[in-house]
Amino acid sequence: MNAPARPSGDAAPAYLDLPPVRAAQGRMTLPGSKSISNRVLLLAALAQGRSEIHGLLDSDDTRVMQAALRTLGVRLGPIGPHAVQVDGVPRFPVEDADLFLGNAGTAVRPLTAVLALQGGRYRLSGVPRMHERPIGGLVQALRGLGADIRHLGQDGYPPLAIGPRGADAAARVEVPGSVSSQFLTALLMAAPLAVQVSGRDLAVDVAGELISKPYIEITLNLMARFGVQVRREGWQRFVVPAGSAYRSPGRIQVEGDASSASYFLALGAIGGGPVRIEGVGADSIQGDVAFARTLEAMGARVAMGPDWLEASGVRVAEGERLKAFDADFNLIPDAAMTAAALALYADGPCVLRNIGSWRVKETDRIHAMQTELGKLGAVAEAGPDWLRVTPPARGAWRAAHIGTWDDHRMAMCFSLAAFGPVPVRILDPGCVSKTFPDYFDVYASLVHP
């Protein structure tokens, strides 16, 4: 792989050239899960006692969360590689602060809910794309609980101003389920603050279909590990009992990131393999381990143990093909992006359905994926919540400069395009720092010409 010389200072390279590769084999250890890392950091900050978090992801998003907690007066510091110690507080000591949260949805939504229900004066902002990602459904629900929140720009979006909380007006609140599961996650994580004041149960009802249910399961699992048991009534009502309060579990281990595992499983599926991923497996609390079933349906072979996954498959560089698919990806929207990239090597058109949440992620991922797949010679058609990809014939591939749209997952997905017959250039490869700063180094250690 060739990259331009790094300029003086800390500037990242503008592009990374990926020459064609033919095989993939080896093993790697996953970095910690972003979803788990940021949830655990916030729960530890709210919990009584001291928590040790091990296996913590070191990335842009987790740094943003840690910086915000320090600004709010929480004591946390490193105790080893990928490990921090957090001293929980009943209430954030700093009650007036400006917080810049980048493009971290796993930080801005839960922090909005916690700060709004705690009370105080805060301003929350982020990068321009964050100010295009909806938060209005969460804000409306929090206002029903007495929160004082104002939109400082476009209504329904960050940046936000939070003021002192008024009277607790409800024992029940409703949140939309079809925009982002992070709205419900944020409310549930903040709910113990509300019930401690009200002295009664709080019921959180979901309006419409709840998307990305496995991410809610992560939230419920982690809340339980910090001592709060949420009663779930189907997927439409969640009850946080009166008297709920977070307590430190002492030591907690962050699993490897199952969404990131999808890229390396995909390498094994199209590069022969085997590729073994350590750090996540059958015992995972993350829904994206189900991507293994998608690969099996496409003809790959997947094995797993409690904390490892391994994939072997075809050799697409030698003309072999994966099986085409037509599938609903509502439960694994992040890993679904990897399936879209694998469609380049299928034996027919592939359809991804129920992926409307892609529209409000780090970028409009449906539009971005459609655009970049088209550059490579695929025929990509899209609708509000679906994407159809017809792979290019062998002679129809086109060398391409792949735009990453300031989206880490776009960069990682399109590394798989190097198994095609043409050179691929990844623009702004440094965007992977959001969740996996050394992704391309690990990738290079597994692929072979």
Image (cartoon, rainbow, N blue to C red):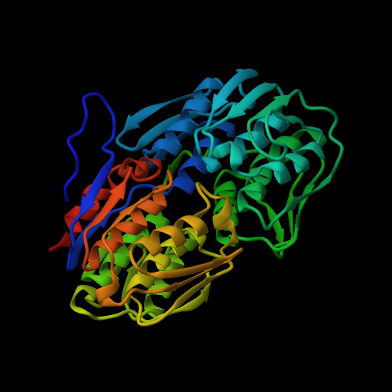
Please state if 232 lies on the left or on the right of 172 as rendered.
left
Residue displayed at 47% across by 26% down: 67
Image quadrant of residue 357?
bottom right
Farthest residue to the left: give it: 449
Tell me the quarter of the image containing the C terminus: bottom left
Residue 233, horizontal then vertical, whole percent: 73, 62
Residue 373, horizontal then vertical, whole percent: 39, 63
Viewer-nearest residue: 157 or 257:
157
Please state if 259 lies on the left or on the right of 100 as rendered.
left
Viewer-nearest residue: 385 or 86:
385
Residue displayed at 61% across by 18% down: 94
Image quadrant of residue 232?
bottom right
Q: Is residue 423 shown to the viewer in this render?
A: yes
Please state if 435 lies on the left or on the right of 388 as rendered.
left
Viewer-nearest residue: 374 or 81:
374
User: In the rendered image of this protein, does residue 41 appear above or below residue 8?
Assistant: below
Residue 381, horizontal then vertical, whole percent: 50, 69
Residue 434, horizontal then vertical, whole percent: 40, 41
Residue displayed at 59% across by 33% down: 46
